[in-house]
Amino acid sequence: MHALKWILGLVLIFVAMALFFTLRTPTHLYAVSGEFTDCPARPSCVSSIATDKPHAIAPLRVVGDPDTALTLLAQHVGGLPGARIAHIKPGYVHAVFVSPTMRFHDDLELLAGDEPLIHVRSISRFGYRDFGVNRDRVEALRAWLEAEQNRPTGEIGRASCRERV
């Protein structure tokens, strides 16, 4: 009985920590700190400014104006399942993704620069591994943006309408 109380106590501590780290807004976000940061040591993050292989991912290449591409991305991301736009500033978008089962939160940051690219960072708020979810999310955004930018000019932004037909 004594061991059961210890196990139950540890489970409750784990759940409390998970809720705390998942529900609070991290201070390392550009929206809070004004600095587009690298990834922490844990593998549940990818960033276009990271230099180490587990975390490094290429920025999103833009054809034309980065702010226009960022607006398109914000509209697309805001419509994805489990996503909501948390912050939007000139040249910056922060979205939060909530996993359907465990309700864990991941942060996606998009930062337009002077060059024709958008820097990207996707990080899980809780947990050590993400099983490639953040990298897959960024690569899916890259594929969507490339397809969107390759559409004839009058059709940009109509991907969802075209795909339903």
Image: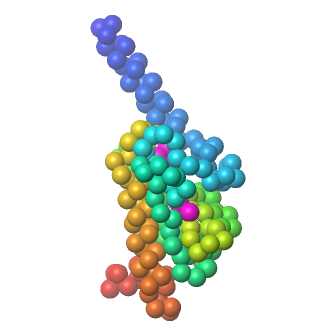
Q: Does residue 40 appear left or right of residue 162 in this picture?
A: right
Residue 103 appears in the picture as rendered: no
Q: Is residue 53 left or right of residue 86?
A: left
Magenta segment, principal secondary structure? strand
Q: Name which quarter of the figure residue 114 lies in.
A: bottom right
The image position of residue 55, as x and y in percent, is 45, 50
Residue 91, x across and y down, in percent: 65, 67
Seen at 46% across and 35% down, the residue is 18
* The residue stretch that appears in magenta: 119-125
Q: Quadrant of the C terminus?
A: bottom left
Q: Residue at x 36, y 19 (%)?
A: 8
Q: Is residue 74 above or below residue 50?
A: below
The answer to which of 75 and 61 lies nearer the viewer is: 61
* Image: 163 above or below 111: below
Vertical side of 44 occupied by 140: above or below: below
Quadrant of res 144: bottom left
